[in-house]
Image (cartoon, rainbow, N blue to C red):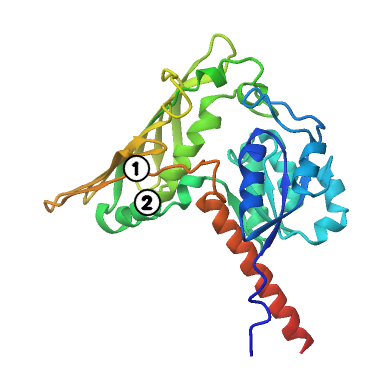
Amino acid sequence: MPDPFSATRCAHIAVVGAGWWSQGWHLPHLSRNYHAQITAIVEPCEAPRSTLNPDLKTTEELQKLYAVPVFKTFDEFLASPEAEQTDGVIIATTHSAHYEVGMKAIGRFHVLMEKPMTTDLAEADWLAQAASKSDHIFMLNNTANFRDSTEKVHNMVKSKIGQVRSVNCYMAAALLWLFEDPENVGWIKPTGSMQGNGFGLGQMSHALAWLYFVTDLEPEKVCCSMLHSEKTGADITDIAIVHCAGNAIMSIHGTASMPFKSYFESTKHIHMKIFGSGGVLSYGGEDQHPESGGLRLELFDGTDQHLPGFYFENYQAEGDGPESLQVFLSGCHLNVQFTKRRQVNLKL
């Protein structure tokens, strides 16, 4: 007898926030993805604006382009028939709005939230607690963490490096144009309980999410120093020493001060070194240029292994989305399948 659920391939997704990242990545990716169907867009501004993309479409244009309704608020969406047909939501609002939308979404929908998670540590804790009590997926869109290369590094650290003793993390980017532009309020000005804003929150969160994943380290104490832009007050260079559980220590250096050449050429420079009881693992290169670097494993037993290719974040605008989106859609689909099977079983 054929499986009555095998034809159900689409996860029904609403996109909350229609700014430059949603218009350039999330919405086009979903529209091209065989396993996804957009159910709604939520955007309060009829004509979204961004210094990062001056040609954003209006909500009216988005409604026509994707043939879905556009709601001004998340509450309006929640009260709509479209919400009843939605499996998951992608939250790509301003960073400060992540918490409010996320708390309303957790428990009702699967959630893929853009990074950084929140602008307030307590809010991040509350979101994590709520997500842990839900039977729905809650993911942060740290695309580097979902790549095969990252899983390979994680496995090598566990099986070859032994007890992690120290870590060196370096990330440099050509982003002064972003953090020294007074119009980029969401990237440079603090909100709520924030004491500042800039490269540390907006960019180092990418590298640190990867680092904590591959090492399984838990930070306990931080000592840091920052250099701030004279134009905007945003931090543009960050240096920190992080003491972790298990007597491990991390040295972190991040800066936005690389010279800008072009969008293709001026990618992030990332170099990670993880020292442990078994040896050292090095992973580095220029983001989006796999040929620029790779992985090296040097062990005390004489092993010296080189694996070419540096794969970190995946923010290609083409195609049907990064690995993180594929995992999210797969999770939504599997949950839908399980729920439908359970409903049929209950009826039987």
> Label 1: which residue?
310
Instruction: Identify the residue at image location x=68%, y=81%.
Output: 4
**Circle 2: element type:** helix
Compare residues 122 and 66 and report the one nearer the observer.
66
Q: Is residue 309 left or right of residue 278?
A: right
Instruction: Identify the residue at image location x=56%, y=24%.
Output: 198
Please, is residue 315 above or below residue 133 in the view? Answer: above
Q: Is residue 277 left or right of residue 68?
A: left
Compare residues 340 and 248 and report the one nearer the observer.
340
Q: Amino acid at mark 2?
A: Ser
Q: Amino acid at mark 1?
A: Phe
- The residue positioned farthest toward the front in the image shown: 65
Instruction: Identify the residue at image location x=66%, y=35%.
Output: 95
**Circle 1: element type:** loop
* Quarter of the rendering containing residue 124: top right
**Lower sequence index among marks 1 and 2:** 2
**Quarter of the C terminus within the rendering:** bottom right
> Label 2: which residue?
149
Q: Are marks 1 and 2 in contact (CB under 8 Å)?
A: yes
